[in-house]
Image (cartoon, rainbow, N blue to C red):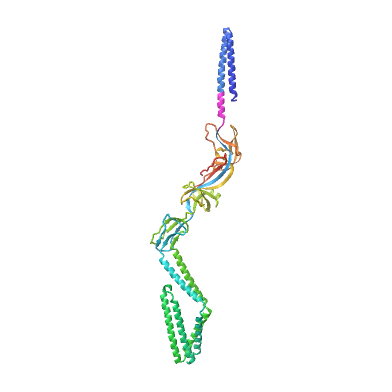
């Protein structure tokens, strides 16, 4: 229609002009005035009619052209549908916290001897953080070691086999006691005299044995015999002196036997002496009793425990770093006692960090232990930091109508220089699709009544058609197309020409999350696909 109208106008105009020329030529040949005037008026009328028709048709053509131009759709934006990746993520803000923070205090009271660290120092595992004066503690350990050595010696002596010389002496004592008992009711005789003489010799032998024991007991230096070394020495010497008196008494008894006969007291004494000698011999032959062994064992165990307690107390006088870390606080003064109401030293582990997040109750069901988390550390824009969810609190935190759950992310090892307190934004991928058809939401329209979504497809140059589509995974920027359009088709946003910038997009209605968290989404398009990007919740 637009191409035929100019030709019609031109033909009509030329025909009218031709008629006018013919009428004019005839008027030149006609001599009658009346007829000539009529022909001239006809020429004027035809010419005027031609001009009017030409102008009118030109006007009609211009208006038709303008109307056709106004009805032609204007493409504000076009896009070739492609495939790409689409994901829905949850974002939450937090800050880096040390995974381990330990406060140290001294369990004992003693003046502070040294503090080799100060606030801000980096220490390694095993480094000494502080030390107390241990002079008194070391003296207690030395005393406990001596007591243990004595208990061990006593136990060893009790459990050691009897010496032959001890058995021989005990047997001689029994024989002497038996001889004394057999002759207790008889007058002095050569045998009685001989027995008395043997008892005197036995007393001398016992004196000799006592002297040997004294020499063995006092052979060690006094400082190794314990705090009662002097009392032991006095007691041992007194035993020797008593044995010397026994020798003297035996000799006196021997002389008395020569001069006097036995009596009732001599009989009782001989009987008691026999019982004592026999008990001593039995003890040597059978070994210590169960009660004696138990007592010696208990004494040895107590000595060992006393030494272990003293050593443990000495260890408590030194604070040692259990891990590599950073000295966050120090409240000690050399030559003064440690503080009672505050920690002596606080150490922070810088080898591992955690991020504590508050996740809304509507999203916590999509979070699970072990999920990978991308961490954007604001102070380190180029750092690639990741982590994993290692803790989800079972108890909620309520603030008004907002219910959140505390979730901890353990940061993976990284070369980035992380510091406690650095702000970070955690991104948790909730759902991810690869190589699917995606379309930016601005190309999608939704009918407010039927809620049917559609896109405008170019079916031919200058020809467009609205096509219903079925949506899948959606973010605030892109949507997955399940059906309706295919990869390679061209979709457009049309404008009437008055406003080429506005086109209603689809309202996804994906809410943000409370507690500092929100959903995000983004596409990673293939060739010809929609642009990628995320959005804040």
Res. 515 visible in picture: no
Residues in magenta, as a range:
61-74
State the count of labels: 0
The residue that appears at 56% across and 15% down in the rendered structure is 47
Residue 508 location, quadrant: top right
Q: Main secondary structure of the magenta part?
A: helix
Magenta run includes residue 69: yes
Magenta run includes residue 270: no
| Position in image of residue 282 (x %, y %) | 52, 81
Question: Eyeballing the image, is 331 above or below 276?
Answer: above
| Position in image of residue 339 (x %, y %) | 40, 60
Question: Eyeballing the image, is 379 above or below 253?
Answer: above
Q: Nearer the viewer, residue 62 or 85?
A: 85
| Position in image of residue 417 (x %, y %) | 47, 50
Question: Eyeballing the image, is 445 above or below 47?
Answer: below
Q: Quadrant of the N terminus?
A: top right
The residue that appears at 47% across and 85% down in the rendered structure is 202
* Side of 137 where 375 appears, left or right: right
| Position in image of residue 400 (x %, y %) | 49, 49
Furthest toward the left, the residue is 335
Res. 286 visible in picture: yes
The residue that appears at 59% across and 22% down in the rendered structure is 7
């Amino acid at each position: 229609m637009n191409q035929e109208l100019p030709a019609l106008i031109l033909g009509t105009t030329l025909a009218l002009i031709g008629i006018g020329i013919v009428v004019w030529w005839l008027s030149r040949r006609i001599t009658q005035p009346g007829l000539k005037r009529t022909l001239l008026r006809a020429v004027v009328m035809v010419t005027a009619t031609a001009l009017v028709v030409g102008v009118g048709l030109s006007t009609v053509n211009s208006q038709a052209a303008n109307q056709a131009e106004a009805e032609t759709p204007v493409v504000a934006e076009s896009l070739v549908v492609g495939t790409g990746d689409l994901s829905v993520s949850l974002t939450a803000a937090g800050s880096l916290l040390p995974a381990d923070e330990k406060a140290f205090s001294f369990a004992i009271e003693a003046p502070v001897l040294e503090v080799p660290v100060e606030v801000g120092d980096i220490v390694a595992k095993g480094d000494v953080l502080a030390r107390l004066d241990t002079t008194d503690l070391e003296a207690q350990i030395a005393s406990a070691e001596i007591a243990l050595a004595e208990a061990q010696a006593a136990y060893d002596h009790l459990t050691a086999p009897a010496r032959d010389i001890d058995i021989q002496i005990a047997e001689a004592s029994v024989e002497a006691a038996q001889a004394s008992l057999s002759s207790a009711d008889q007058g002095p005789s050569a045998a009685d005299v001989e027995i008395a003489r043997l008892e005197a010799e036995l007393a001398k032998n016992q004196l000799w044995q006592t002297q040997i024991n004294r020499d063995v007991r006092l052979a060690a230096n006094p400082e190794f015999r314990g705090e009662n070394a002097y009392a032991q020495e006095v007691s041992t010497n007194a035993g020797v002196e008593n044995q010397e008196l026994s020798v003297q008494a035996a000799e006196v008894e021997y002389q008395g036997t020569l001069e006097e006969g036995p009596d009732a007291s001599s009989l009782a004494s001989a009987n008691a002496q026999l019982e004592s000698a026999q008990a001593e011999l039995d003890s040597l032959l059978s070994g210590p009793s169960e009660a004696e062994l138990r007592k010696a064992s208990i004494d040895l165990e107590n000595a060992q425990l006393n030494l272990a307690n003293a050593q443990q107390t000495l260890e408590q006088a030194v604070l040692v770093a259990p891990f590599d870390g950073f000295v966050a606080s120090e409240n000690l003064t050399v030559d003064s006692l440690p503080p009672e109401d505050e920690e002596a030293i606080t150490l922070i582990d810088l080898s591992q960090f955690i991020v504590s997040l508050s996740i809304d109750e509507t999203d916590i069901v999509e979070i699970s232990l072990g999920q990978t988390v991308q961490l954007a550390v604001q102070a380190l824009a180029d750092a690639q930091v990741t982590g994993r969810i290692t803790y989800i609190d079972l108890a909620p935190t309520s603030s008004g109508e907002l219910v959140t759950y505390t979730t901890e992310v353990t940061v993976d090892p990284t070369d980035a220089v992380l510091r406690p307190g650095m702000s970070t934004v955690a991104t948790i991928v909730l759902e991810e699709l690869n190589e699917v058809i995606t379309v930016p939401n601005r190309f999608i329209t939704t009918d407010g009544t039927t809620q049917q979504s559609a896109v405008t497809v170019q079916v031919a140059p200058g020809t467009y058609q609205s096509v219903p589509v079925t949506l899948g995974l959606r973010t605030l920027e892109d949507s997955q197309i399940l059906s309706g359009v295919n990869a390679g088709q061209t979709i457009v946003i049309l404008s009437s020409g008055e406003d080429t910038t506005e086109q209603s997009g689809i309202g996804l209605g994906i809410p943000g999350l409370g507690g500092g968290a929100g959903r995000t989404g983004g596409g990673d398009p293939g060739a010809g696909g929609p642009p990628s990007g995320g959005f804040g919740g």
